[in-house]
């Protein structure tokens, strides 16, 4: 459809806005409509610990590789920050079920906090943290609302819950449609002009996930909660997604080659179709899920 001009890249922006501001909030709210139990509490804490640990690993790996391969600020940022904010919720909702989405929110919250502090500092050189960008982010707002409803034990009426769940069910198909448009509109001449792009893709999609699997295995984090291996699997999925689409917008704002950032996002999105199943298969084989 993209090649025949029936669909344009501009259409994907409209669909992304609908997904970000309507569908994803519904999925987040629905995920927190569960009873407050010790198992969910321990699982949520494990997801938070894993999210922090993963980002520490990514920061250390990127710092080492940055010195070794002389990575630019944009290349370091696209290696560290994944597109989990846009992709992990629809992936988990479609693959594992909406009841597991609650364990995606710690990763999204940690990454949002870092991308608007450390990520912004990398791209702009400005050490000032824009707290309003963090706390006004639509995902962060609805995570806080969901946590409040979860702790307070506030439940939606059956009619409202059904409407929210039905809206949230569109997240998977819409995410796949947006991804297809992005890949279909990719300019291969531009891809060939960026020789270091493949190094960034290797670090983002293969090296980082493999190191994270090793850290999870040797740290024995899975023992901290019931279904711990599956919760860590969700964190691994979030860390294995393509480079963050939000970095393209940040690169545009701070004048750090937005064309390169968008190309990295498009190429890693295409490649993750092959790398994510391989990472999932390896994790499943090691942890037996």
Image (cartoon, rainbow, N blue to C red):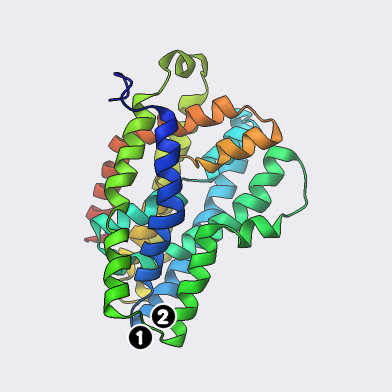
Towards the viewer: 12 or 228: 12
Q: In which quarter of the image is residue 279?
A: top left
Q: Residue at x 27, y 58 (%)?
A: 169
Q: In the rendering, at what x and y percent does residue 286 appear? A: 26, 56
Numbered badge on residue 47 = none
Towards the viewer: 1 or 40: 1
The residue that mark 1 highlights is 37
Q: Answer whether labels 1 and 2 touch (C-beta < 8 Å).
A: yes
Circle count: 2
Q: Which residue is drawn at 30% across and 37% down?
A: 273
Label 1: state its secondary structure.
loop
Residue 57 against residue 269 in the figure, above or below = below
- Quarter of the image that includes the C terminus: bottom left
Q: In the rendering, at what x and y percent does residue 176 appear? A: 30, 41
Residue 244 against residue 233 in the figure, above or below = above
Residue 199 against residue 234 in the figure, above or below = above
> Horizontally, is 111 left or right of 11 in the view?
right
Query: Badge 2: how crowded within 10 Å, few (<14), some, or many (20+)?
Result: few
> Horizontally, is 282 left or right of 199 in the view?
left
The residue that mark 2 highlights is 41
- Label 1, label 2: how far apart the Cα atoms are: 6 Å
> Horizontally, is 158 left or right of 52 in the view?
left
Q: Residue at x 38, y 24 (%)?
A: 185
Regarding residue 84, the answer to whether it shows in the image is no
- Quarter of the image that includes the N terminus: top left
Regarding residue 112, the answer to whether it shows in the image is yes
Q: Quadrant of residue 97?
A: bottom left
Towards the viewer: 249 or 236: 249
């Amino acid at each position: 459809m993209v090649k025949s001009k029936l669909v344009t890249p501009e259409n994907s922006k409209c669909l992304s806005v609908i997904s970000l501001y309507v569908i994803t909030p519904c999925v987040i709210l629905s995920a927190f409509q569960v009873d407050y139990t010790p198992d969910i509490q321990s699982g949520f804490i494990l997801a938070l610990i894993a999210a922090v640990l993963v980002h520490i690993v990514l920061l250390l790996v990127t710092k080492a590789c940055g010195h070794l391969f002389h990575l630019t600020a944009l290349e370091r940022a696209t290696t560290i920050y994944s597109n989990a904010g846009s992709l992990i919720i629809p992936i988990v909702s479609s693959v594992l079920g909406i009841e597991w989405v609650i364990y995606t929110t710690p990763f999204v919250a940690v990454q949002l906090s870092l991308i608007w502090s450390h990520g912004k500092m990398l791209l702009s050189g400005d050490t000032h943290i824009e707290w309003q960008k963090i706390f006004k982010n639509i995902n962060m707002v609805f995570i806080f609302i969901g946590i409040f409803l979860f702790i307070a034990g506030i439940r939606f009426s059956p009619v409202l819950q059904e409407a929210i769940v039905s809206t949230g069910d569109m997240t998977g198909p819409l995410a796949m449609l947006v991804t297809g448009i992005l890949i279909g509109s990719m300019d291969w001449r531009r891809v060939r002009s960026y020789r270091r792009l493949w190094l960034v893709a290797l670090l983002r999609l293969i090296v980082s996930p493999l190191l994270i699997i090793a850290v999870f295995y040797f740290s024995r984090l899975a023992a901290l909660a019931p279904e711990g291996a599956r919760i860590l699997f969700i964190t691994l999925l979030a860390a294995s997604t393509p480079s963050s689409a939000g970095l393209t917008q940040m690169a545009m704002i701070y004048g750090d080659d937005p064309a390169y950032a968008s190309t990295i996002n498009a190429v890693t999105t295409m490649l993750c179709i092959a790398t994510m199943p391989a990472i999932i298969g390896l994790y499943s084989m090691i942890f037996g899920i």
